Amino acid sequence: MPPPAAQPGPLPVRIVLVRPRNPENLGAVARAMKNFELGDWAIVSLGTHDFATARRVAVHAEELLDRPRLAATLDEAVADCAWVVGTSARKTRGKRRLLPEEVAREAAARAPATTAIVFGEERSGLDAETIDRCHDLSFIPAGAEQPSLNLAQAVLLYAYEARLAAGVVAPGRQGAFATDADLQRVEEALRRVLQAGRFLGAEERHAVGDLAAVLRRARPSPREARLWETALRTVRRRLPEG
């Protein structure tokens, strides 16, 4: 008899919780992640320290509560990720609005680079600043009478889709992708060039973000990102001041 087919491994997905306040949700998120073999998560500005309550809910996933990445800012939590997706039903100029299964398929195509899926706090979700910081957005098409899902329920759905995509979508390009930190440096170098060239007005508005989004969608390698950054910094040095 032929050997049984190997089971697909988990996708390189990081669950990022921003300011979670409810310890039961922390435990339920850990359990949902364990259900679908996700082990990478980060918590930004932890709003509760009641881990005893969280552990009672995290049935057979208590070890995940011992090792989340605790971060002071979203930048810190996603610096080594190649793609950052915020979960929000808002429509934001320049950002795609993807269904959970679309996020999972693209995360698989971007593997082995890490995709961060960012969830807001229980009462109000992600704020405008955090949404602006994400590369793309994703929403769960819930019913109009009750469109808001519990935090752990939402994580469960994305974890489930990630598990499915791991089994049906082949990994994409071989080799590393530029991280969010790499592309943040490119974006800052671009901003300085556009300021020096007087392309930007008194208010930056969307220009830099829209241009940087094109580069992010191209999924450059670390070497390509460094080349962009070096080229832009060289051009900036040769432009007149003021």
Image (cartoon, rainbow, N blue to C red):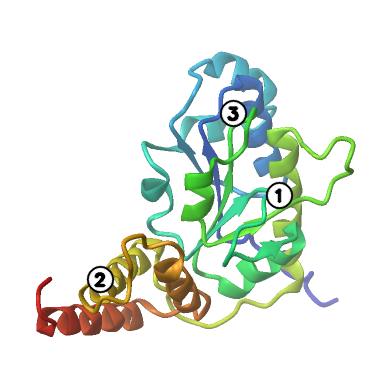
- Residue 103 seen in the current view: yes
Q: Position of residue 127 (x, y in %)?
A: 54, 40
Asked if 129 appears above or below 149 in the picture, the reply is: below
Q: What element carries label 2?
A: helix
**Label 1 is placed on what type of residue?**
Ala
219 displayed left or right of 53? left
Q: Using residue 202 as the reference point, say whether residue 66 is left or right of it.
A: right
Where does label 1 land, which residue? 89
Q: Which of marks 2 and 1 is in front?
A: 2
Image quadrant of residue 203? bottom left
In front of the other: 215 or 199: 199
Q: How far apart are marks 2 and 3 (CA)?
A: 50 Å
Picture coordinates of residue 189 (x, y %)?
A: 26, 71
Secondary structure category for the residue under label 1: loop
Circle 3: residue type:
Glu
Q: Which residue is drawn at 52% across and 37% down?
A: 18
Characterize the local packing of mark 3: few (<14), some (14-19) or many (20 or more) Cα atoms within 10 angstroms.
Answer: some
Residue denoted by label 3: 62
Q: Which amino acid does label 2 sit on?
A: Gln
Q: Which of marks 1 and 3 is nearer the N terminus?
A: 3
Would you say 64 lies left or right of 140 here? left
Q: Which of marks 2 and 3 is nearer the N terminus?
A: 3
Looking at the image, which residue is at 60% across and 28% down?
26
Residue in front for this viewpoint, 39 or 44: 44
- Mark 2 or mark 3, which is nearer to you? 2
Between 60 and 187, the one lying in front of the other is 187
Q: Residue at x 66, y 22 (%)?
A: 24
Q: Which of marks 2 and 1 is nearer the N terminus?
A: 1
Q: Where is residue 223 in the image (x, y as percent from the top left)?
A: 31, 81
Q: Position of residue 235 (x, y in %)?
A: 18, 84
Residue of label 2: 195
